[in-house]
Image (tube, rainbow, N blue to C red):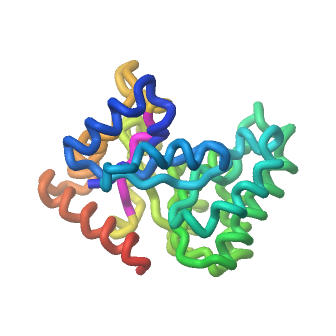
Amino acid sequence: MIDFHSHLDLYPNPVETADEVQRRGIGVLSVTTTPSAWIGTSRLGQGRPAIRTALGLHPQLASERKHELKTFDALLDKARFIGEVGLDGSPGFKASWTDQSRVFRHILHACNDAGNKIISIHSRRAATPVLDLLEEFDGVRSSLLHWFSGSRAELERAISRGCWFSVGPAMIAGAKGRSLVAAMPRSRVLLETDGPFAQLRRAPLEPWDIAVACLSLSNIWNVDYPEAESIIRRNEATLLAGQ
């Protein structure tokens, strides 16, 4: 199975974590928070075929790193995966909303033109404006909403647009998260950890903790663990095949 949203480069010992990922045979989409981090982070995947690196510009860094959009554009052809990108409507980031919107619009426009990109999207307290922009750039088809926490109406809108959802142990630990996951089409659900930022029982999540999320999904879906794992693997294959 694949951890579709991990900040592999931000673990205390990224090389050690990457080696353990490879040893366990787990796939990891290693998202970046700035375009300038992509080249260095990509080295963690060298000789480790289970690891792929996404080219990102985190919305919380939009104001201070918007000048890196030139770097983003220069690297775009080398990256099939994009992330972490998106919008954050939390109170602490409202001052950067204009920059966030400009950056995310630029990224979606570039991905729309390039085609065949899988995009891991941050939408905390911003699901509606994220979906508005996705509808504006209709050529962006493989949009993966990371740790979706919007309303049920926003979820239904995302489902109607054909979005994917990556869910992790920290999200499913809460009642709202479980309720949202239960309403997601099983054929559109993937796994993530958001480690090392996300925690469970006060410990940072590791990429192999996707197994915890899969176990939770088996309970939510009322199927046994092997069936939940089978569903996830089919979903992974479908997304990666570009369908």
Membership of 193 in magenta stretch: yes
| Left or right for 135, reference 227 | right
Residue lying at 59% horizontally and 61% vertically, measured from the top left = 153
Instruction: Residue at 59% x, 54% y: name it.
Output: 55
**Is residue 134 depicted above or below 45 in this figure?**
below
Residue visible at 61% across and 74% down in the picture: 140
Residue in the picture at 37% in, 27% down: 200
Magenta-drawn segment: 189-195
* Residue found at the far top of this picture: 202
Q: Is residue 166 above or below residue 204?
A: below
- 154 falls in the magenta region: no
| Residue 97 pos. (x, y %) | 83, 46
Q: Judge by depth and name the residue closer to the eye, 185 or 145.
A: 145
Could you tell whether 237 is left or right of 34 in the image? left
Pick the quarter of the image with the C terminus: bottom left
Residue 92 x, y percent position in the rendering: 76, 31
